Amino acid sequence: MGSYQPVKGTEEFYPADYRMKEAVFAILRKTAQRFGFQEVETSPLASLGLLTAKSGDDIRQQIFILEKRSNEEIALRFDLTVPMTNMFAARAKQLPKPVKWFSLDKNWRYEAPQKGRQREFYQLSVELFGSDKPEADAEAINTLLACIEAVGLTAKDVTLKINNRKLLEGLLRDIVPEQLLEATIRLVDKSGKLDTEALQDAFAEEGLDASQIERINQIITLKGTPAAVLKQLQTWKLVGQALDGYNELKATLAFIPEDYVTVDLSIARGLAYYTGNVYELFDRNGLYRAIAAGGRYDELVKLLGGESTPATGFGLGWSTLSLLLTEKKLLPQPISGPEYYIAPVNEDVLPDALKIAAKLRKTCSVDLDLLRRKLAKQFDYANAIGARKVIVVGPEELKKQSVKVKNMQTGKETVVKMADL
């Protein structure tokens, strides 16, 4: 083991792990493209002002801020939604609507590393700009569910917990004063991570009395199938903002598969830029953190200097997804080694071995011995790296313009003419 360990909360991928990760990423990219989303790339560096424009106080403490140079305050992005929205805002007038983009890249958050959450992490971010219709929310959600199914998971493995910020805020406004609304929503967002007593204490510390806390608990404990929860909400005689949120949620639910969905009024999403439907995807057994999360953020484009534009989307995290795929034994095992490994019998045939390698590399993956080892050692190495076939280059075969080719899976060995390679 080396003297210097990787930075805590980061991950390094050796070849086999890297191939496996890239195999999953290829599936996610293809799925997003099937829904008409186009891939974009944002810089990992962003101005601190951009990242903190509408992200809530909590996120500022999680941003990796670089050393200040001149008047520039630069930081590492903590998600892809904000920089992708900024990209859209810069060219919004020229782009045909709706705009459907995705990105799959690294992000950084300064926080305590734990299972399923790293300081440096990969995320698939799928964003849709320009439609305020419920089918736009559904398009994002259905893309997420298609990604989940494409990697082998089903509704038996995961559930989408969905709520609406307008519905939640409208209900809470009848209970708490305006100045305590934001703090109350932040606590609701954390309610799944706190036990009942700790949550009640946290509400009380914000200045809420027992009656208010009891009414809040009635709201955030309402969860179940779409039909059951919508029926219960109808009995609450919703008005104003709460009614608007209810109608948005109901309309969106009509366009997504019910077997995945749990309507859960405790889902709030901590980031301050969400304005409508919000959701988080969890494993059914509750073993891991949220696998994915998203929602509607209709005010962010305008906040970043663009024209007012409705927007919706989600982020899918690799850290937690990989844990669930590992548990379910669904991680792909892509072919690892080269198609051919070339084993020269001695130094005299090296020039011919190199020529064969150069010819095959125009169409195939090829490795060859670089240590001038004995033939037995070369076979051991070829087997260790997963080579599918070994080409033995020897003087006797070369005189006949041929080589020996051994299939490493079947053990079958054949003589092949050089011209036929």
Image: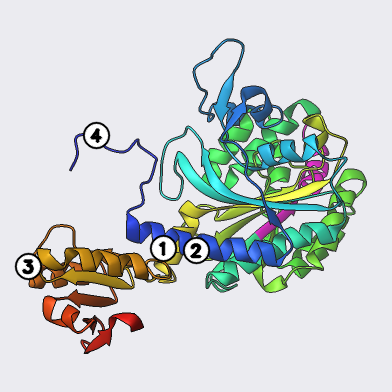
For badge 1, the amino acid type reads Met
Q: Nearer the viewer, residue 272 or 243?
A: 272
Stretch of the chain drawn in magenta: 161-177
In the image, is 228 to the left or to the right of 322? right
Instruction: Specify which label sits upstream in the sequence, 2 or 4.
Output: 4
| Mark 2 to mark 1 CA distance (whole Å) | 7 Å
Q: Is residue 71 above or below residue 246?
A: above
| Marks 1 and 3 close (CB-CB < 8 Å) | no
| Marks 3 and 4 close (CB-CB < 8 Å) | no
- Position of residue 27 measured from the top left corner of the image (x, y, whole percent): 55, 66
Q: Is residue 397 above or below residue 201?
A: below
For badge 4, the amino acid type reads Tyr
Residue 163 within the magenta-colored segment of the rendering: yes
Q: Which mark is residue 244?
A: none
| Marks 2 and 1 close (CB-CB < 8 Å) | yes
Quarter of the rendering occupied by the N terminus:
top left
Residue visible at 55% across and 56% down in the picture: 291
Instruction: Specify which label sits upstream in the sequence, 1 or 4.
Output: 4
Q: Which mark is residue 20?
A: 1
Instruction: Specify which label sits upstream in the sequence, 1 or 3.
Output: 1
Instruction: Specify which label sits upstream in the sequence, 3 or 2.
Output: 2
In the image, is 329 to the left or to the right of 396? right
Can the viewer see residue 273 in this picture? no
| Marks 3 and 2 close (CB-CB < 8 Å) | no
* Residue ID for mark 2: 24
Q: Nearer the viewer, residue 229 or 141?
A: 141
| Mark 3 to mark 2 CA distance (whole Å) | 38 Å
Q: Choose mark 3 or mark 2, whichever is in front.
A: 3
* Residue ID for mark 4: 4
Q: Circle 4 — which element? A: loop
* Residue ID for mark 3: 374
